[in-house]
Image (spheres, rainbow, N blue to C red):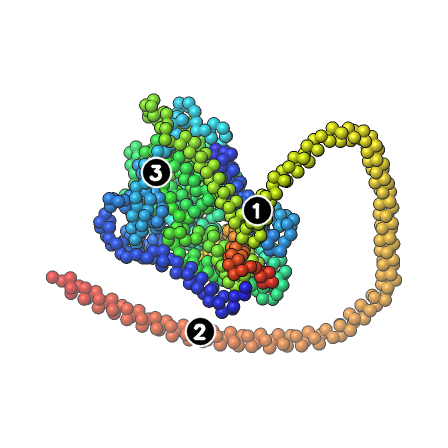
C-alpha cells in the first residue's frame, strides 16, 4: 500500500509540528495566584530548570492539598499522577495542574520499614543483609554538572563544574571515612540540556560495571531556602529529597528502596529526608533497581549546609547497607518492646515483594506483546492454534505410546549397546589409525610446497642478478640526462618563486597600509563616541544633582 | 547487599534479556540470518566492556556502543538495493538529530515536566521510527536514523563544549555499550517502524512484500 509522496511529506510535517507543539499542549493553563504563596505565578520559560529571572523572583512549582495547604515547593514541574511522600510519610497524588500549581489529594499514610531488626545491639539485620554479603561500594555521579548554590557560588548555574560536585565530594569523603569504597565520577555531561540524562547513561553504566551496592545521581532543587533548611542536633544543614522516576519498568523496586532509606533516616535523623517525589521520567533508574536521584537542598541554600546534609545522609546509607557498626558515635534511642514487632499491615519483605511484582509484570507484558505481535503477523495463526489444541489429545496419546515403547525397549537397547561395544571400539580405533595415516602425506605436501617456493625464489633472484648490469647502466644514463636538465629546471622554478614572493609582499604591504588607515579611522570614531558618552554622563550627573538638591 | 540479592539480579537480568531478544529480532529483520544476528548481539555485548578507543580531542568511542553499530549501519547502506534507499538512512539520521536536538533545547530539562511526554532516552527512538516510516516505511532507515542521530548529537555536544572553550571534557561515543542510547534508539526505532507498518498493513488488508526494505 504505497503512500503518495505528498501525503508522506504532509505526514512528516504534521508529526514534527505535533512534537514541537507538545510543550504548549502540556502546560496549557491560566495564571493563578495561590493564597498560600501570595504572589502571582505565571508559567514562563521552559521547564523545571527555572531561568535566572524566575529563580530570583521566587517562581516555583507548588503542590497543595485539598485544604489548600502547601505540601511541596520545588523547581521540578509537576504533572498529573505524580506522587509525593512528605516528611511525615503522608502520600499525596496530583489530580490536576494549572500553571505552576498542582492540586493533590491525600492517598494514605505509609508505614515505612525503620530497620528495627537492624538495631545497634546487633540482634539481626534485614532479610537480604543476612543472606548476602555487601560489596562495600557506593557509586556517585552528577547528570547536571552545572548546578550551583547561590549564597556560596554566587550563581545558580555555570557552564562547567558547579558547586554540586563539591557536595558529591563531601558525600564521598563521608562514606570513605567509614571504610566504604566510593566509585565517584566527575564526568561532565554538558551542555546543560534535556539530553544530559542520555549522556550520563554511559557514566552510570560504567560505574555499575563495578557492582556497587547502590548508585546515586546528585542534584540540587530550586526552592526557597527555608523549605530545605534544617537544624539537627545544633547543626545547620539542608534536607535531602529523593526522586524516583515513574516511567522506569522496575519502578516498584526503586520506590521501595527510596522508602526504605527514608524509613531508616527517619529513625536515626528525623527530618533529614524532605520527602520522596515520584515523578514521570526514568532518570537512568532503569539501569539498576538501586539507583536513586537525590536533591541536596536548593539553590538558595549554602553549599556548606548541603555538604553537612549529605554527610548525614552518608550515615543513613552506610547504616542501611552495612549495619549499625558503620554509624560511629551514634546512639539510637531504645524503643518499647511492642515497637520491635512490625505491625500486621506492614510488608515485612517489601523490597522482595516489589521484585517479584516487577518480574511478573515484565514477563506478562513481554509475553502478551509477543503473542499480540505474532497473531497480528500471521492471519491464520488462530486457526492453526485451534487445530493444534484440537489435535492435542491425539498427540499426547501418541507421545505416551512412544515413551512407553522407548522405556520398554531401553533395557534391550542398552544390552545391545554393551554387546556391540568391543566391535564399535575396534572400528573407532581403526578409523583413528586411518586418520593418523594422513599425517605423513601432509608432511610430504608441506616439504614439496616449501621446496617449490624456494626454487621459484632462487630463480627470481638469479634473473635479477643477470639483469643487474643492464638496469644499472640504464639508471646511470637517466641520471646523466637529468643532470643536464636540472640547472635549467631549477632556474625556471626560482624565477617563478621570486615573482610569486614579490607579488605576495606587494599585497601584504597594501593590506597593512589599508588596515592602518582603517584603524586610525576607528580610533577617531571611538574617541568621538567616548567624548559623547562623557558629555552625556556629565549632563546626567548635573541633572541628578539638581534633582537631589533640596 | 540488595544489588546482589537474587531478586534484584533477576529484575536486571529479565530486563536485559528482553532487550537483547528485541535487539536480536531487529537485526534478524534487517536481512541478517539468525546466526549472524546472534553473533552480532554477543559481539556488541562483549565489545561494550572493552576500553573505549580514543579518537583525539577528548573524543573516544566505545566499540560495542558505537563502533559496531556504525559498522552495521555502513553495511546496511552498502546493501541497500536502490540509490534512494541508500540515501534514506543518513537522511533519517540527520532529520532525527535535528528534531531531537531542537526538542532537547525546547523541552524542559527534566523529563516528566509536561505530563507523559517521552523520556529523552526514547525520544530519538520514537523520532527515528516515525521519520523512517514516513520517509519510506524502512526498518533499515530507522536503525541507521537511531544510531546516526545519537552520533550526531554526541558530536554536536562535543563541538559545543569545545566552542565554549572546554577542551578537556571527555565525550565517549556510545559509552554505555550495548545498553547505550545509540543502540536503544536504533533497535526501538526499527521495531516501531515495523510495528506501525505491520498494523497499518493489516488495517489496509494485508502486506505488500515488494515495498518493504
A406 relative to A272 in the view: left or right: right
Tag 2, which secondary structure?
helix
Residue B97 locus on image (x, y percent): 49, 59
Helix, strand, or loop for circle 1? Answer: helix
Same subunit under labels 3 and 2?
yes
Residue of label 2: A515
Q: Is residue A315 visible?
A: no
Near-viewer residue (A189 or B183): B183
Q: Residues within 10 Å of mark 3 (few under 14, many from 20)?
A: many
- Quick check: marks 3 and 1 in contact, CB under 8 Å? no
Q: Nearer the viewer, residue A22 or A483?
A: A22
The residue located at (40%, 56%) in the rendering is: B107
Give the residue pinned by disc 3: A273
Instruction: State the residue in front, A288 or A268.
Output: A288
Task: Name the residue: 44% across, 30% down.
Answer: A322
Dot 3 or dot 2, earlier in sequence: 3
Real-space Cα separation, disc 3 to disc 1, in angstroms: 57 Å
According to the picture, the residue beneath numbered tag 1 turns out to be A386
Residue A299 % position (x, y): 33, 47
User: Which of the two marks, 1 or 2, is nearer to us in this view?
Assistant: 1
Q: CA distance from mark 1 to mark 2?
A: 90 Å
Amino acid at each position: 500500500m504505497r503512500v503518495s509522496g505528498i501525503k508522506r511529506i504532509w505526514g512528516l510535517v504534521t508529526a514534527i509540528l505535533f512534537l514541537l507543539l507538545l510543550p504548549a499542549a502540556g502546560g496549557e493553563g491560566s495564571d493563578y495566584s495561590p493564597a498560600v504563596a501570595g504572589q502571582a505565578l505565571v508559567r514562563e520559560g521552559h521547564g523545571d530548570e527555572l531561568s535566572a529571572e524566575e529563580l530570583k523572583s521566587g517562581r516555583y512549582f507548588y503542590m497543595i492539598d485539598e485544604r489548600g495547604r502547601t505540601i511541596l515547593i520545588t523547581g521540578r514541574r509537576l504533572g498529573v499522577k505524580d506522587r509525593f511522600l512528605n516528611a511525615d510519610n503522608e502520600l499525596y497524588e496530583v489530580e490536576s495542574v494549572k500553571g505552576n500549581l498542582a492540586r493533590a489529594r491525600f492517598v494514605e499514610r505509609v508505614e515505612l520499614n525503620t530497620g528495627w531488626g537492624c538495631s545497634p545491639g546487633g540482634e539481626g539485620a534485614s532479610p537480604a543483609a543476612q543472606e548476602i554479603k555487601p560489596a562495600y561500594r557506593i557509586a556517585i555521579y552528577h547528570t547536571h554538572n552545572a548546578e550551583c548554590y547561590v549564597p556560596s557560588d554566587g550563581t545558580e548555574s555555570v557552564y562547567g563544574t558547579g558547586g554540586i560536585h563539591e557536595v558529591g565530594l563531601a558525600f564521598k569523603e563521608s562514606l570513605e571515612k567509614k571504610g566504604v569504597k566510593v566509585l565517584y565520577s566527575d564526568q561532565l555531561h554538558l551542555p546543560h540540556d534535556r539530553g544530559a540524562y542520555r549522556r550520563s547513561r554511559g557514566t552510570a553504566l560504567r560505574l555499575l560495571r563495578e557492582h556497587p551496592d547502590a548508585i546515586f545521581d546528585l542534584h540540587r532543587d530550586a526552592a526557597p531556602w527555608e523549605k530545605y533548611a534544617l537544624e539537627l542536633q545544633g547543626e545547620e544543614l539542608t534536607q535531602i529529597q529523593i526522586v524516583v522516576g515513574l516511567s522506569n519498568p522496575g519502578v516498584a523496586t526503586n520506590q521501595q528502596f527510596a522508602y526504605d532509606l527514608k524509613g531508616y533516616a527517619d529513625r536515626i535523623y528525623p527530618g533529614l529526608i524532605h520527602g520522596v517525589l515520584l515523578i514521570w521520567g526514568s532518570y537512568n533508574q532503569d539501569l539498576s533497581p538501586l539507583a536513586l536521584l537525590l536533591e541536596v537542598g536548593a539553590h538558595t541554600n549554602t553549599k556548606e549546609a548541603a555538604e553537612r546534609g549529605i554527610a548525614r545522609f552518608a550515615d543513613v546509607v552506610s547504616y542501611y547497607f552495612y549495619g549499625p557498626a558503620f554509624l560511629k558515635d551514634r546512639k539510637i534511642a531504645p524503643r518499647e518492646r511492642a515497637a520491635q514487632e512490625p505491625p500486621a499491615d506492614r510488608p515485612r519483605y517489601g523490597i522482595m515483594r516489589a521484585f517479584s511484582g516487577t518480574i511478573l509484570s515484565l514477563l506478562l507484558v513481554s509475553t502478551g506483546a509477543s503473542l499480540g505481535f505474532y497473531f497480528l503477523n500471521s492471519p491464520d495463526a488462530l486457526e492453526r492454534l485451534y487445530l493444534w489444541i484440537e489435535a492435542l489429545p491425539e498427540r499426547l496419546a501418541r507421545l505416551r505410546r512412544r515413551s512407553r515403547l522407548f522405556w520398554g525397549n531401553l533395557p534391550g537397547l542398552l544390552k545391545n549397546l554393551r554387546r556391540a561395544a568391543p566391535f564399535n571400539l575396534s572400528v573407532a580405533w581403526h578409523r583413528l589409525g586411518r586418520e593418523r595415516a594422513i599425517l605423513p602425506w601432509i608432511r610430504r605436501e608441506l616439504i614439496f610446497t616449501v621446496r617449490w617456493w624456494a626454487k621459484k625464489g632462487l630463480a627470481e633472484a638469479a634473473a635479477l642478478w643477470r639483469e643487474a648490469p643492464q638496469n644499472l647502466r640504464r639508471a646511470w644514463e637517466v641520471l646523466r640526462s637529468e643532470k643536464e636538465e636540472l640547472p635549467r629546471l631549477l632556474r625556471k622554478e626560482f624565477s617563478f618563486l621570486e615573482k610569486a614572493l614579490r607579488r605576495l609582499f606587494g599585497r601584504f604591504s597594501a593590506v597593512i597600509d589599508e588596515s592602518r588607515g582603517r584603524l586610525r579611522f576607528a580610533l577617531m570614531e571611538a574617541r568621538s563616541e567616548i567624548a559623547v558618552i562623557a558629555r552625556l554622563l556629565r549632563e546626567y550627573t548635573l541633572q541628578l544633582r539638581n534633582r537631589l538638591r533640596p | 547487599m540488595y544489588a546482589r540479592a537474587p531478586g534484584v539480579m533477576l529484575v536486571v537480568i529479565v530486563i536485559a534479556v528482553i532487550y537483547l531478544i528485541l535487539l536480536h529480532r531487529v537485526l534478524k529483520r534487517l536481512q541478517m540470518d539468525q546466526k549472524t544476528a546472534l553473533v552480532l548481539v554477543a559481539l556488541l555485548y562483549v565489545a561494550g566492556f572493552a576500553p573505549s578507543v580514543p579518537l583525539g580531542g577528548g573524543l573516544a568511542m566505545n566499540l560495542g556502543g558505537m563502533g559496531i553499530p556504525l559498522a552495521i549501519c555502513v553495511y546496511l547502506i552498502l546493501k541497500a538495493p536502490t540509490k534512494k534507499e541508500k540515501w534514506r538512512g543518513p537522511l533519517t539520521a540527520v532529520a532525527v538529530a535535528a528534531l531531537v536536538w531542537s526538542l532537547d533545547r525546547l523541552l524542559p530539562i527534566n523529563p516528566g515536566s509536561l505530563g507523559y511526554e517521552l523520556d529523552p532516552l526514547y525520544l530519538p527512538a520514537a523520532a527515528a521510527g516515525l521519520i523512517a516510516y514516513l520517509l519510506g516505511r524502512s526498518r533499515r532507515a530507522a536503525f541507521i536514523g537511531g544510531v546516526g542521530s545519537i552520533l550526531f548529537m554526541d558530536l554536536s555536544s562535543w563541538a559545543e563544549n569545545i566552542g565554549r572553550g572546554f577542551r578537556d571534557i571527555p565525550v565517549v561515543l556510545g559509552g554505555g555499550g550495548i545498553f547505550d542510547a545509540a543502540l536503544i534508539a536504533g533497535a526501538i526505532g526499527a521495531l516501531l517502524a515495523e510495528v506501525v507498518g505491520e498494523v497499518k498493513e493489516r488495517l489496509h488488508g494485508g502486506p505488500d512484500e515488494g515495498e518493504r526494505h
